[in-house]
Image (cartoon, grey):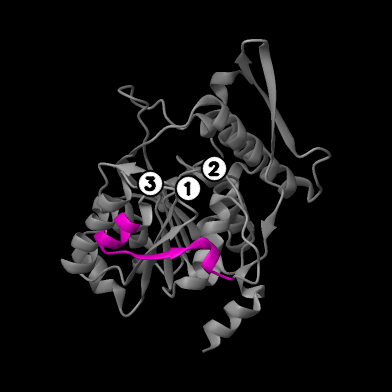
Amino acid sequence: MSEGDAHVLEEVERWLSRRSWSAADRPLGRLMAAKHGTTISVVLPALDEEETVGEIVSVIRRELMEAVPLVDELVVVDSGSSDRTGEVAAAAGARVVHRDAILPRIPAVQGKGEVLWRSLMVTSGDIVCFVDADLREFSADFVSGIVGPLLTDPDVQFVKAMYDRPLGETAGQGGRVTELVARPLLNLHWPQLAGFVQPLGGEYAVRRSLLERLPFPVGYGVELGLLVDALHTVGLDALAQVDVGSRKHRHQDGQALGRMAAAIYRTAQLRLSRGHLVRPALTQFERAEEGFVPRTHAVDTQERPPMREIGEYAARRAA
């Protein structure tokens, strides 16, 4: 079979037709009619995002809490910012919690997944919606679009946002780690997930009852890990995606992308073998006066257990 003869799995084709939507498919009025007491928490993990976090919080408060009461709780979890991220977020109307103040019995480690995992302890919504704090020209569709299927379809449990990712002025060139690492891994090892346009995107909404059952990779592998584990836990038909337009944000340099790629590959490797890396490190090179100098970085090797296994969380939910 030639390259041009390849085609998507029939199961994925059916999924794309049944579980891929646009934010416009569910207007706010329909969502409010379907809410029926379901509570929604929006979480922004943030590290040195004073330039963008305030606008994101303001849009969510104005359009989804004041104009219509769709969102019940808006929390920014600050993972140790050295700028005014927390102050700006609070002034815009978010509840700000520092990562290290959550579950102090368990010493915090660096990483996005660590922040998302801890956020379950300080939120209460039946649906938890994660939104990255570095988005520019933010639209409320990033929230209302992805919570929509969870409110209107009881069979849906996990919804990812999909969008265009321009790189500078060039359309569709963002998401380099997605195209070079995550998409090949998913297509080769978890082909049921091949239909996800943005598998590593930071905007997704999940029922708490599912999130609390999943382990959380502490670093950049968290999005791939949650998606793969959700597939194995609830099945493809419980997963969905919603088109919310275009996503503009701060892009990382090539070396940062390399570290992200290593963490994502490691997350996939663990799920394939449940083994461990012989040497969980990545060596990169920087040019200096004396030539190329090696810099070695640790690759995230830790995962947090499902939150329902944490005693403090179980006690809080029972209260």
- Mark whose residue sits in front, 2 or 3: 3
Residue identifier under label 1: 14
Range shown magenta: 87-103
Comparing labels 3 and 1, the label whose residue is closer to the camera: 3
Can residue 156 be seen in the rendering of this structure? no
Q: Residues under labels 3 and 1: Cα distance?
A: 39 Å
| Disc on res. 49 | 3
Element marked by disc 3 = loop
Say which amino acid is labelled 2.
Glu
The answer for how far apart the CA atoms under marks 2 and 1 are is: 6 Å
Toward the front, the furthest residue is: 289
The residue sitting at 60% across, 30% down in the picture is 258
Q: Earlier in the sequence, mark 3 or mark 1?
A: 1
Q: Residue drawn 47% across and 72% down?
A: 122
Q: Are marks 2 and 1 in contact (CB under 8 Å)?
A: yes
| Most distant residue in the bottom direction | 319
The residue at the far left in this view is 67
Name the residue nearer the viewer: 11 or 91. Answer: 91
Task: Specify whether residue 101 is painted magenta.
Answer: yes
Q: Which mark is residue 80?
A: none
**Residue occupied by mark 2:** 10
As for residue 110 lying within the magenta part, the answer is no
**Circles 3 and 1: CB distance less than 8 Å?**
no
